[in-house]
Image (spheres, helix red, strand yellow):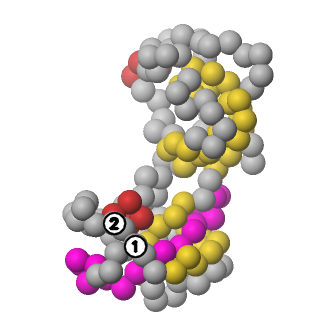
């Protein structure tokens, strides 16, 4: 499902991904609120197109202003417990991990996902980047569905 929204001009490029964090206190009184605040908070999005012939609009949050773009929810690559991890099943993240130096950390604690949330697995990618999990977890790298269900 494609949506039109406003994003910071630095993100206004096809292929850019971001996690929508919701309203900032600086948004209060902005005339463009309804165009900016129309996404689902905490969801990951990918810019699919930049609207032609649109102007750069001033913004109290984005120092270089905002532009109109088309976005759609995007999938999420993550590590999940291996048991029951197959395409079509639902899984949730294993839990927090303090080992930020681990090559799998970005997949164990991905932006745009909650630890309690179950999501549908679209694809099993296989072994995670790490050789041994410091928390002794048996993990599999998967691609979650873009819609979060």
Placement of 96 over or under 111, stated as above or below: below
Outermost residue toward the right in this view = 52
* CB within 8 Å, label 1 to label 2: yes
- Per the model, the C-alpha gap separating discs 1 and 2 is 6 Å
Residue corresponding to mark 2 = 103
Image quadrant assignment for residue 132? bottom left
Residue 39 in the image: state x and y as whole percent. 60, 39
Decide which of tag 1 and tag 2 comes sooner along the chain: 2
Q: Is residue 9 left or right of residue 53?
A: left
Placement of 41 over or under 107, stated as above or below: above
Placement of 26 over or under 114, stated as above or below: above
Q: Nearer the viewer, residue 68 or 25?
A: 68
Q: Quadrant of the C terminus?
A: bottom right
Residue corresponding to mark 1 = 129
> Which residue corresponds to the image point at 34% horizontal and 75% vertical from the top-left?
130
Residue stretch in magenta: 133-149
- Element under disc 2: loop
> Quick one: label 1, few (<14), some, or many (20+) residues within 10 Å?
some
Placement of 109 over or under 58, stated as above or below: below
> Which residue corresponds to the image point at 42% horizontal and 58% vertical from the top-left?
110
């Amino acid at each position: 499902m494609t949506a039109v929204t406003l994003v910071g001009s630095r993100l206004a490029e096809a292929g850019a991904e971001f996690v929508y964090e919701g309203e900032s206190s600086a948004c209060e009184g902005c005339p463009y609120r309804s165009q900016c605040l129309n996404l689902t908070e905490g969801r990951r999005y990918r810019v699919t197109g930049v609207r032609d012939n649109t102007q750069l609009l001033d913004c109290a949050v984005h120092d270089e202003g905002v532009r109109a773009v088309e976005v759609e929810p995007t999938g999420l690559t993550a590590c999940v417990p291996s048991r029951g991890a197959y395409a079509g099943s639902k899984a949730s993240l294993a839990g927090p991990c303090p080992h930020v130096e681990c090559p799998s950390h970005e997949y164990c604690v991905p932006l745009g996902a909650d630890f309690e949330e179950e999501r549908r697995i679209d694809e099993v990618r296989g072994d995670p980047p790490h050789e041994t999990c410091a928390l002794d977890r048996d993990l599999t790298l998967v691609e979650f569905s873009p819609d979060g269900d």
